[in-house]
Image (cartoon, coloured by chain):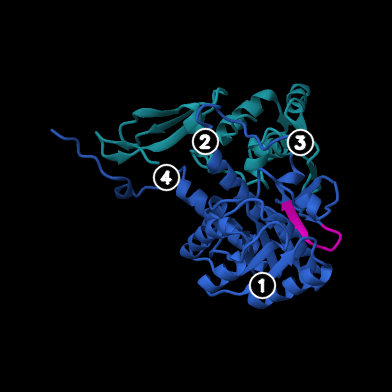
């Protein structure tokens, strides 16, 4: 998927992705020449169709998690289906604020371990010592984690 | 005056979404994971209820008894049966270093199945808009199949058996995901009705580039009358590997395993 600024005849660059939480997606693209910004808005079905392929509009920076799509989309999974064991080279992770812990506890058990790991890796990548709900919101939007 | 709009391929600057690259990376992950698997064999039939899953499980157990490293991928995502057929232990799946460990049967068969993940008695359901779910559900199932291939630590295997659901869609998805189309072991029952349905599936499999390694006629000697196995074997020029009665003996399964290894 590419966007062309017809007036400048320049390919527009991906700028930002937003997930309002209602199943829709907004992705902004900017013309590097004139600075004009256009937004791609997808409805829930279109958003789901792209997500179903296991790809993310705007790209991805974190390595894929095992069974990422299955864990992120299956709603009838066992809460204790997975047991996370220690990762090689895993050090001390970031601190979770009380509010962030409460929010994490509301995530279904089937996907909770993966969600926790993704946010921890995001915090590490951005040099954040503490994960708060605000960090979770930003990470969710930046990483395209619809429904997490 | 018409607008002068360049086409997609005219635009050569980097595309940060890189959707094609993301798909390519997914395929490479499958190929890398299966690089230590000597042979992928899909157990197929164009007909439901012929015993594919039972054959897959018993064949895998027989291969393990022969000392072969065997795996089973239960690709029947909506009706998984492998955990029970292989008597897999009930335990959580262990995740580590970017992979999930397969469950291991008492004989040493390495297996992964949606049945290990779903709540008892609950169907496979996905989060997503209810309207027109048929549009995206197929893609999600294909993605799930890809993840079961790429993210399970299969390890070195002599044979990975893939238990397909009835129909042809899952074989097409499998062939698309693997570096090369899988070999196919076909299962039928003796009846002409089964023969006709299975024939279509075999033609589709061969057209898709799969090697047909043999045919197995199941449930012989009971109510199901006919000679579908022999007719299909002759028509396609492939071996009829076995004609199995109900409740085959361990000896018969072991014989089949030897013939499958010999033909594959």
Q: CA distance from mark 1 to mark 4?
A: 51 Å
Mark 2 in CB contact with mark 4 (< 8 angstroms): no
Residue closest to the eye, A137 or B175: B175
* B64 in relation to B81, above or below: below
Task: Specify the chain shown as blue.
Answer: B
Q: Which residue is mark 1?
A: B241
| Residue depicted at 59% across the width and 53% down the height | B47
Which tag, 1 or 3, sits closer to the chain's start?
A: 3
- Front tag of 1 and 4: 1
- Quadrant of the frame with the C terminus of chain A: top right
Res. A46 visible in picture:
yes
Q: Which residue is mark 3?
A: B121
The magenta stretch is B105-112
Q: CA distance from mark 2 to mark 4?
A: 30 Å
Q: CA distance from mark 4 to mark 3?
A: 44 Å
- Badge 2 marks a residue whose secondary structure is helix
Q: CA distance from mark 2 to mark 3?
A: 22 Å
Residue closest to the eye, A126 or B159: B159
Which chain does the residue under circle 2 lie in?
B
Mark 4 in CB contact with mark 3 (< 8 angstroms): no
Give the image quarter of residue A124.
Answer: top right
Give percent across and percent down for residue A26.
Answer: 47, 28
């Amino acid at each position: 998927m590419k966007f062309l600024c017809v007036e400048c005849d320049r390919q527009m660059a991906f700028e930002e992705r937003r997930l309002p939480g209602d199943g829709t997606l907004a992705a902004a693209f900017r013309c590097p020449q004139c600075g004009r910004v256009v937004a791609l808005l997808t409805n829930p079905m279109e958003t789901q169709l792209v997500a179903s392929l296991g790809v993310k509009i705007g790209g991805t920076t974190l390595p894929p998690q095992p069974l990422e799509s299955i864990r992120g989309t299956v709603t009838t999974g066992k809460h204790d289906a997975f047991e996370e064991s220690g990762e090689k080279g895993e050090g001390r992770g970031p601190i979770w604020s009380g509010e962030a812990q409460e929010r994490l506890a509301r995530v279904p058990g089937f996907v909770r371990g993966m969600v926790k790991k993704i946010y921890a890796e995001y915090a590490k990548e951005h040099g954040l010592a503490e994960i708060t709900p605000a960090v979770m919101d930003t990470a969710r939007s930046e990483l395209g984690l619809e429904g997490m | 005056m018409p607008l002068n709009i360049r086409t997609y391929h005219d635009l050569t600057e980097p595309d940060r979404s890189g959707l094609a690259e993301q798909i390519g990376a997914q395929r490479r992950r499958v190929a890398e994971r299966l690089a230590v698997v000597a042979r992928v064999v899909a157990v197929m039939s164009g007909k439901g209820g012929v015993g594919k899953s039972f054959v897959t499980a018993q064949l895998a157990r027989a291969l393990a008894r022969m000392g072969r490293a065997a795996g089973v991928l239960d690709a029947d995502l909506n009706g998984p049966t492998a955990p029970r057929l292989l008597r897999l232990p009930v335990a959580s799946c262990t995740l580590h270093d970017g992979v999930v460990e397969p469950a291991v049967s008492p004989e040493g068969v390495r297996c992964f199945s949606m049945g290990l993940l779903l709540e008892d008695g609950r169907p496979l359901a996905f989060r997503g808009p209810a309207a027109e779910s048929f549009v995206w559900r197929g893609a999600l199932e294909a993605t799930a199949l890809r993840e079961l291939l790429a993210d399970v630590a299969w390890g070195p295997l002599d044979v990975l058996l893939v238990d397909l659901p009835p129909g042809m869609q899952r074989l097409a998805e499998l062939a698309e995901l693997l570096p090369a189309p899988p070999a196919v072991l076909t299962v039928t029952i003796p009846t002409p009705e089964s023969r006709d349905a299975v024939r279509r599936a075999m033609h589709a499999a061969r057209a898709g580039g799969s090697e047909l390694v043999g045919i197995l006629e199941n449930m012989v000697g009971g109510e199901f009358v006919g000679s579908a196995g022999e007719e299909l074997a002759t028509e396609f020029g492939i071996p009829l590997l076995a004609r199995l009665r109900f409740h085959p003996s361990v000896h018969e399964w072991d014989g089949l395993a030897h013939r499958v290894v010999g033909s594959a």
